[in-house]
Each structure stands twice: as structure tokens, then as C-alpha cells.
Amino acid sequence: MIKEQPYVPSRELTDDETAARVVFREILKSPPVQSKTPKIAFMFLTPGSLPFEKLWDKFFHGHEDRFTVYVHSSKQKPVHVSPYFVGKDIRSEKVGWGKISMVDAERRLLANALTDPDNQQFVLLSDSCVPLHNFEYVYHYLMYTNVSFIDCFIDPGPHGTGRYSEHMLPEVEKKDFRKASQWFSMKRQHAIMVTADNLYYRKFRLYCKPNMDGRNCYSDEHYLPTLFNMIDPNGIANWSVTHVDWSEGKWHPKAYRAQDITYELLKNITSIDESIHVTSDGKKTVLVTPCLWNGMKKPCFLFGRKFYPETLDKLLHFFSNYTTV
């Protein structure tokens, strides 16, 4: 048996860092909560009503003892059409794009979902997200692996490390700063760590803001990947299970309209087995991460994002076919 080597910091830690590291270490050492009916918490971050509730209703049907739903609506109270969503709204606050309020909403959803001890996996979804597989496939994929699917990569360009502020020192060093998609699935231990963190969260709240010191820093793209790169780098997959298409090279990803929805499109997305990032510097380096599930290369994505509401009928029509394992 290989003896674990003690962590040796490269510098003297502050008192707050020492305390935070102890808390995180103890959370990671704690055995997972044993549950007879482990569940996935599906956490929806939305401005208002969810246009794909009918699709999610079809996805959830027949699995009532294996999932929970939480809805954080930032602008108006949703009108629900599926019984699985009725009464699932949590107390919400306004959310500003690119602001720390986005991270606050994520933490609020996690805190509410953690009140149910049966919740073992926590998935963050938007109002434009749809399921790409059937429930059984998603449940098995998330429950039977010991990593969190949190995206994380190094971008040396202006949209990555260029957003770093030295005000984050000494706790957050430039070499540890990471970028990612905000859409995650994380295990219970990691969800507890995110809600327990005050030290690193405070640094991002104060020093990762739009138009601060001549740079635009967006906490929802940097806080979680930087945090987990520092405290449990081997515990995350470094890719998100939510697919989005950035191939157009614009500020926002490709959004799918009704005419885009075909059986072939959906099967193509569900067959992708590599996660791709492109750096924002002049080199435009393409970073390819194979999607390894318990050491085996598997399709990366369980959910898809940026679907217009007008795609609902077509998605419902194709659902039983494209979600067949």
C-alpha cells in the first residue's frame, strides 16, 4: 500500500487558508452518505418559466423515487405545466449575467438540494437545456463514477488568465486560475464544499467582476474550476456533461432553431467522445480532452444547451428514438 504523501504548500498559508484546507480535507475524507434511494438533484437556473417542462416530464416519468427538482427563477415566478415541477420553486434573487449573483444562485440551489440527504448528485441546468439520453442512462452515468463533471482548462488568453487580478493574492495565484463552462454535475461532497467555502468565494466576489481594472472577469466561468483545481484536481473530470456548440466563434454559442432539429443532429451530439476548448490568445490552441468514464472512453454529454422553445415539438417527437441507448 502506497503511503499518501502529506501536502506541502509552496508558501506559508494564511490562517484562513489553513482553516479552509482542513475543512475541505475533512469533507473529502468523510464517507459518502449511505442512502437506500440515492437521487439526482436537477437544479434549474432560469429567468422564469421553463419551456421544456413537457420534455423533462417525459424524461422523469416512471423514476419518481430517484430524482428531485429545484427551480431558481431570477425574474418572474414560473408557470409550471409538469407536476414534477409544481411546488419546486426555491427562494430566488435577481441574477445578472457575468456577475457574482450567478454564483450566488448556484450556491443557493446547492444549499436547498443538500437539505435532502438522499441527493447524491447535483446537476445545474438552464432553461434552454434538454436531456440527450433516457433517465436510466443518465442515472447510471452519474451515480457510478466518483468524479464531479466540472469543466476546467487553462486559457492563457484575454478571456482566461487575462481576467486574473493580483488582488486575489495570496490565496489565489495566477498559475491556479482556470476557465470553464458553468454547467456542472457534482457529487455530494463537492456540493458541500462549494456551500461551505467563504474564503475563495470572497476573493471572486470582490475581484472578479465585469469592467474591473480594465478587464471583464465573470465569476461563473472561473470560480468553480479554479476552486477545484486548487483543492481537489483529481476529483473532477475537466469537462461538462452539458453540450454547447461554440464552433461559430461568437460571444454566444450556437442556438438551435426548429429547422435544425433532426434525428441525425441529436445522434451526432450524443456520440461525441471528446471535449474541445479553444484558447483565446493569438495561437487559438485547440485543447482536446478525451471523455474518460471510469477509465473508459465514453460519449461526453448527457444534456444539450441553447435550444429555442420552438424546438419542443420536434424534440418530443424524436425523444424516444434519440434517447435509446
Image (cartoon, helix red, strand yellow):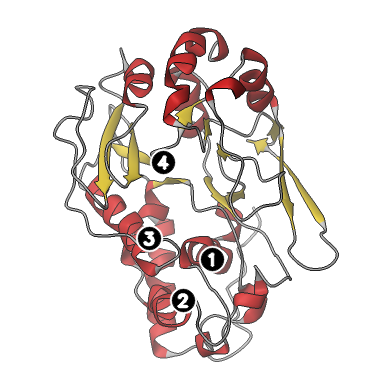
Tell me how far mark 1 sits from mark 3, CA to CA: 12 Å
Kind of residue sitting beneath label 4: Leu
**Of residues 228 and 15, which is closer to you in this image?**
228
Q: Which residue is mark 3?
A: 102
Residue at 48% of width from left, 47% of height from top? 184
In the displayed structure image, the side of residue 280 where residue 42 appears, left or right = left
Q: Kindly check if marks 2 and 1 are in contact, taking CB atoms under 8 A apart as contact.
A: no
Mark closer to the observer (2, 1): 2
- Disc 2 vs disc 3: Cβ atoms closer than 8 Å? no
Q: In the rendered image, which residue does mark 1 sit on?
A: 222
10 Å crowding of disc 4: few (<14), some (14-19), many (20+): many
Residue 236 lies, with reference to residue 49, above or below; the image says below
**Residue type pointed to by label 1:** His
Q: Which residue is mark 4?
A: 125
Dot 4 or dot 2, earlier in sequence: 4
- Residue occupying image coordinates x 62% and y 62%: 3
* Most foreground residue, 257 or 227: 257
Q: On the image, numbered disc 2 is attached to which residue?
A: 209
Comparing marks 1 and 3, which lies closer to the viewer? 3
| Residue 52 picture quarter | top left
Residue type at mark 3? Answer: Met
